[in-house]
Image (cartoon, rainbow, N blue to C red):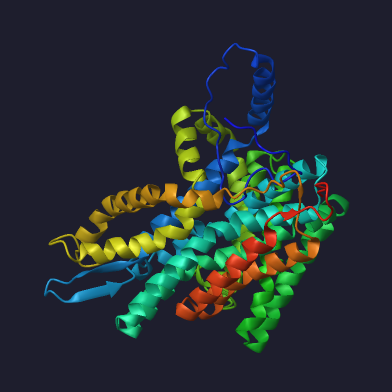
Amino acid sequence: MTAEPRSTPSTPEPASAPTVPPPTPAPVADASTSRTGEQGAARAAALASRDFVVDLARVACILLVVVIHLLMIGVGYAPDGSLVVSRPLEAQPWFAPATWFGQIMPLFFAVGGFTALAAWRSLRRRGGDATAFVRGRVLRLAGPALPLFVFFSVVLGAATLIGVDPTLLDTIATGTGSPLWFLAAFLIAQCAVPWLSQLHERAPRATLVVLAAGAVAIDALRITTGVVEIGLANLFFVWLFVQQLGFWYSDGWFRRRRVVTLVGIAAAAYLVIWPLVAAGWYSPDMLVNLNPPTMPLALLGIAQLSLMSALHRPLSALMRRRPAQAVVYLVGSRAMTVYLWHLPVIIIVEGLSLLIPGAAPEPGSAGWWASRPLALIVVLGIVFAIAPLLVRFERLSTAIPEGFRAPSPTATAAAAVLAIVPPFLVMQWFLDLPIALVGTALLVAVLLLLRPRLGALRGGLHA
């Protein structure tokens, strides 16, 4: 192996790609045994302090999103041979109540806050600053998005040129691009970590109260005026509030509570949601409350993090088993690839099933429901098959080689804003060819802005 270049501090791990390090073989006794032993000891210490339940929670969130989308997309043939396109999961009478537990994005943001705070504190101890942190976060989220926007640009462009029905193309593009909202919200939250961590250290309670009050005020203004766009301000207040809960989890607040207390907190959060929905201010479907984000999501974050903490002991016992660690590592090391690419793969699989006799039963029928486990295996199999081609974009290096310098704070801030724009456009106006092309161009610009620069002075000075 070649030695890595010396570098300035960089973020140690992407919040978007949770990993459980795989077991390593014992070091070979040679001249480097001492150094290897020191590295092994450091690795063991890191593993001992790692909260594997957080890794499990993030992977579970991603896999649940895949399952939900697989059950939402129904393409098949009716008994009379006509093509049926529907959303079987949403047609179930129990769907809306189930979203009170199945809407797990608040938990993902909360545990993302835990991981981001740990990464920021580690970087700061090693002499890093907010610019380095933001650069690392943007690289780890914008990098995996670039090949997806390139894919959409090519496919939608080709489909337009060959004359595919515009209505059908618009329906497919809208569906496959829907998960991209997450990138905009998560980038905003992650880039704010250095400043919010300072507020958390100075006034943790006041910070939570101000964020919650802001979310309530935005919702009240949106509801009273009927202007939905006002709710976009809660991309900040709601998701930053939920992320801040992860800071409290990191500091041990949730772990210090008794199980009965945590269950009581979760129950109270759900009880607060109930009258808000009954009053007609919010939808009983928590997926509807996602865009724009609303206060019920903040309450779900409290409930979900409390329940995760209440179950921490049995979940920790589960994560001490090698099979569980292996699954979490397998999915977690490809987390962004699974999240970003599962819907295009689902659409492709559903389309190909129409060509196989008997493989596309009527959506919502007993045969269709029975086919979902096999469909899930096929989708995940394809995603993991293409992952080796894409995973390099999840692992873009944040290191600054010797003789180079890091991008300036201005360039880093500009890159962060440009990275947020493409998913925000998709969130507001849905995916189409122009947005795919604009997104591709902006994400290329992001990576160029964040690349290391040659030293400003001859002699290889670097930041």
The one of 177 and 275 positioned closer to us in this rendering: 177
Q: Is residue 226 visible?
A: yes
Left or right position of 78 against 414: left
Question: How far from the left and from the top, in percent, is residue 240?
Answer: 70, 61
Question: How far from the left and from the top, in percent, is residue 304?
Answer: 59, 52
Residue at (52%, 66%) from the top-left corner? 180
Most extreme residue toward the top is 29
Most extreme residue toward the front is 458
The one of 241 and 356 positioned closer to us in this rendering: 356
Residue at (69%, 75%) from the top-left corner? 233
Most extreme residue toward the right is 202
Q: How many circles with numbers are drawn on the protein? A: 0
Question: How far from the left and from the top, in percent, is residue 339?
Answer: 48, 56
Residue at (84%, 56%) from the top-left corner? 199
Q: Is residue 436 above or below residue 457?
A: below
Left or right position of 138 against 165: right
Which image quadrant for residue 85? bottom left
Which image quadrant for residue 20? top right
Question: How far from the left and from the top, in percent, is residue 384?
Answer: 39, 47
Residue at (64%, 34%) from the top-left corner? 50
Which image quadrant for residue 280? bottom right
Q: Is residue 61 visible?
A: no
Left or right position of 168 against 136: left
